Amino acid sequence: MRQTHPTIWQSRKTAQRTCGLALLAIVCGLWSAQKIAGVHAAQDCGDALQAASSPSQSFFSMADPRSSFDGTHLLFAARSQQQSDWQIYESDADGTNARPITHCAGDCTQAEYLPGGRIVYTERGAGSVWGSSTVMVARLDGSDAHAITFGPGDFQVVRVLHNGRILLVANAPLTEAGLQHPQQALYQMRPDGSGLYRLPQTVAQQMQKEQSPAPVPLPGIFPQRYAPRPVPLLYPSILHLQSKTGRMLCLNAYPTLDAPNGKFVTVIAQVRVLTLGKDGRERILGNAPVEQDGSFYLTVPADTPVRFALLAKNGAVIHEQKSWIWARAGEDRGCAGCHENPALAPENHWPLALKRFDTPTPLGTAAGMVPVHKDGRQ
């Protein structure tokens, strides 16, 4: 069944004369915030509503308008016919000269401008591999379209922040939705797909205030132009895309919010790394040693969902991560612990995992992968 986008104004195909009203209803109608992750992520309505104009192309449905940084163009999602997939279009600010940017196999929505002549958007359906949606980045002409999320979580683009990062909403933990609707949270990520980070609740609440403008009246006309807005910072990527792995460093796996005293008391001997295949099956990449101070250092296959399980000396699982995360090609990812308190800073010492190993423990060779049954057996 085709998935219906939640924020659309749908016009009848025979009522061509109302197309001008349609896009404006989207532009200003989206001040009504969507409740996501306990916050309201409202769309901007734009400025300088002036004389009416008709779009150069009629659409069955349109959604998610976003003006360019200089106010001269408009980015939006649309369906040409009732059964068509959602695609991303760009037009002049008055709705004329609309041109398609994407040709997605599924639905592409929630597009945002990025600095440097690029866009970011959400792709659902046929284009998604590990989950119901994938965040994509492409050039303004639609070329070089590539994924920047690599695992389940129902990722959705909310906004490009001024610091150059992308604000997302996704499941918490990052897993596929089960029979019940999962909790959702706000995340930040760099435009190259690195540095995925869940925002603390206090920060999410502050963004709720900043992302929710007051309602404005609906004049029912196209704006001729939008007021220019600040260009986000250009975030240069330092990834090494020729690399097939990323590195992960944990400073101390003992501190945790999941233990009564805030720390695991059982001695952690190893960390097991699991991955999720494109067939939806979990596999074990391998085990790596955990040092006395709780640190470990390892490599994992790039652009592949992974999660960790802490093991005791007898091989029993002490604690298991629920969220799927990833490392991009050549990315160095670090964490202070395993679900540690984000309000606490790690101790200022050099972890033993970096002292004892010149290189991280390599995991993820095809020969070493072990399938995992649904009941946890290998």
Image (cartoon, helix red, strand yellow):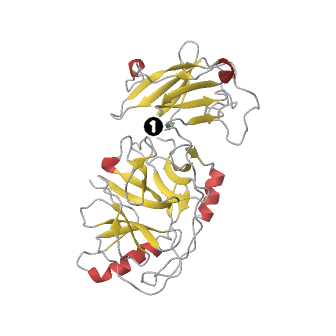
Element under disc 1: loop
Residue 294 shown left or right of residue 134 in the figure: right
Mark 1: amino acid: Asp
| Residue 282 place in picture, x, y as percent | 40, 29
Which of 210/316 is in front?
210
Looking at the rendering, which quadrant does residue 238 occupy? Answer: top right
**Residue at image point 45% right, 53% down:** 156
Looking at the rendering, which quadrant does residue 13 occupy? Answer: bottom left
Looking at the rendering, which quadrant does residue 99 occupy? Answer: bottom left
Which of 189/11 is in front?
189
Residue of label 1:
303
| Residue 275 place in picture, x, y as percent | 44, 30
Residue 301, compared with residue 97, is above or below; it is above
* Residue farthest along the top direction in this orientation: 314
Residue 113, compared with residue 106, is above or below; it is below
**Residue at image point 77% right, 32% down:** 348
Residue 334, compared with residue 45, is above or below; it is above
| Residue 30 place in picture, x, y as percent | 47, 70
* Quadrant that contains the C terminus: top left
